[in-house]
Amino acid sequence: MVNRFKRKRLGFAAAGWLVTFAMMTPFLWMVLGSFKSTVDFLAFPPVFVFRPTLGNYRQVLADNAFVQYTLNSTIVAAGATCIGLVLGIPAAYALARYRRTAIGVVLLLARMAPGIAFLIPLFVMFLELHLVGSYTSLIASHLIFTLPLTVWMMVGFIEAVPVEVEKAALIDGCSLAGVLVRIIVPLTTQGIAATAILAFIASWNNFLFALVLANDRTKTLPVAVLGYIGYNSIQWGALMAAATLITLPVLVLALCVQRYIVRGLVAGAVSG
Amino acid sequence: MAELTIALPVKRARRRDWTPELLSLPALIAILAVMGFPLVYLGWMSLQRWALVGFEPPRFVGAGNFLQLAQDERFIDAIGRTFWFTALGLVTNLPLGLAIALLMHERFPGRNICRGLLILPMVATPAAMGLVWVIMLDPTLGVVRYLLGEFGIANPPLWLSDPDLVVPTLVAVDAWMWTPMVALICIAGLAALPTEPFEAAIVDGASALQRFRYLTLPMMLPTLMVAAMLRLMDLLKLIDIVYVMTGGGPGHSSETVNLYNYLAALSYDKVGYGAAIALVLFLIVVACTLALVKMRRPSW
């Protein structure tokens, strides 16, 4: 009997690990490929053991443009995240404590609307304001998903804070703004960090908005990576190295907040 | 005097507390600026014939754009194709996701590590991973061809270059990214199921298959519906990986509504026409989501 259970568990372990390994294959192949020389890349059957080279990374990082794009992605994602938090946390507090449901409807609509429905009018508006290609336009447009995401996540975290603490502070003469700054924010720092990471990832990964609103100087990484694939030539190794550099920070950040990922995705990025 | 002391609290209670509105005001203004106003503007735009680069100022054409849409074969094809994408995506993601969740629900060494790694495909930058898949699927040098060869399939299809296979191939890549999300939602659902019915079923001698069919599946339906709704909304709007991996090709054989919308509005410079497509796409997503929510209610 015990043996049967043990064997069953072993079977589950084998299946579980096999599924997980299969799902990780593209990442493994990407990292492996980023260390391959062009000769190794063009070998068929593909080589699994080879002399690793840092040449691809050197090529990508030596390119000033790539450094610039990384900076762009960081500025835009950090900007959209911070503004989302500053605007979103008070709103989330109001929603959590006073239960105004109107924003819930807005949230759902934002989740359903295709990004292009905002993008076309925003593009025309930013064109009128001479803002196309600016960080301002990118950060403002990314608020479309970072703000609802922040509100959605923070409502959950704030609801978990016991009301009694706030009531006590209010009775002691603390203002509502004081409650927010002195009680809610300190008590939800973990939640704020998780929310910030999720908003950052959503903004970092966004493709379509940057494709339309950025110019050659303000391009973000997801758009820039397309540059390694031309009509007739693919820079295999450089593409893999760039893809690794783009995704690796996101993967590490995501593993830090894995408990909240699904909740974040429900409010989710306006992916398209 | 007595009147005053009674009146005061009443008066105070009647006065409206505007605090929640004040706190939400900044967020509300931002939402109106980047979402509300653009949507209204989109409605107005959809009634104009308008080219930005061509310096053609907006000219009111009423329902003209929508009438033209009804005759635009490329648009109608794109709608059919988008539904094909969505249907294929749903029928692969949901059963696979549930299966993975059932597996990860069992206790085995390293289970938590496996669950943790599940999140990676859905957070990795889709544009970058799409290109990695392009390389993996390369018909001459790709690792996929090699692996299939190892299993005795000597002449694998051309994947992204085959007009008949490009949609299923893209759905497979999309499934790689998003089936784990379905799985994670189902894992949470499974963990929340009551244990008593299962214990009773085991005592009564129900087989594993029977327990799945008559207990797990019906009790998991609400969870599956949530997952289906999320996937439905995203599949109908699919664009990133299509743009990156095929650009809608070969020909137009993988062009989704969202991609055609982008091309029409911003590449072909027909912003009014593009706005009309965006409105229709929005309505399609809302209608399909509502239809799914309605389905959730039992019909009896």
Image (cartoon, coloured by chain):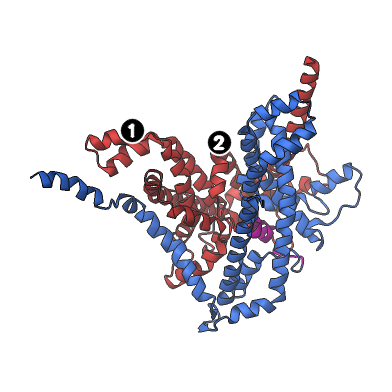
Chain colours: A red, B blue
In three-dimensional space, the C-alpha distance between marks 2 and 1, rounded to whole angstroms, equals 27 Å
Please state which of residues B132 and B126 is positioned toward the viewer in this rendering: B126
* Percent coordinates x, y for residue A153 in the rendering: 48, 44
The residue singled out by tag 2 in the image is: A259
* Percent coordinates x, y for residue B186 in the rendering: 65, 39
Instruction: Find residue B279 and report its image quarter.
Output: bottom right
Q: Are marks 2 and 1 on the same chain?
A: yes
Q: Residues within 10 Å of mark 2 (few under 14, many from 20)?
A: few
Instruction: Find residue A159 and report its image quarter.
Output: top left
Q: Is residue A113 left or right of residue B96?
A: left
* Label of residue B277 in the image: none
Q: Residues within 10 Å of mark 1 (few under 14, many from 20)?
A: few
Q: Does B240 appear in magenta?
A: yes
Is any atom of residue A45 visible in this view? Answer: no
Q: Quadrant of the N terminus of chain A?
A: top right
Name the element at disc 2: helix
**Mark 1 falls within which chain?**
A
Magenta residues, start to end = B234-250
* Label of residue A164 in the image: 1
Residue at 29% x, 52% y is: B18
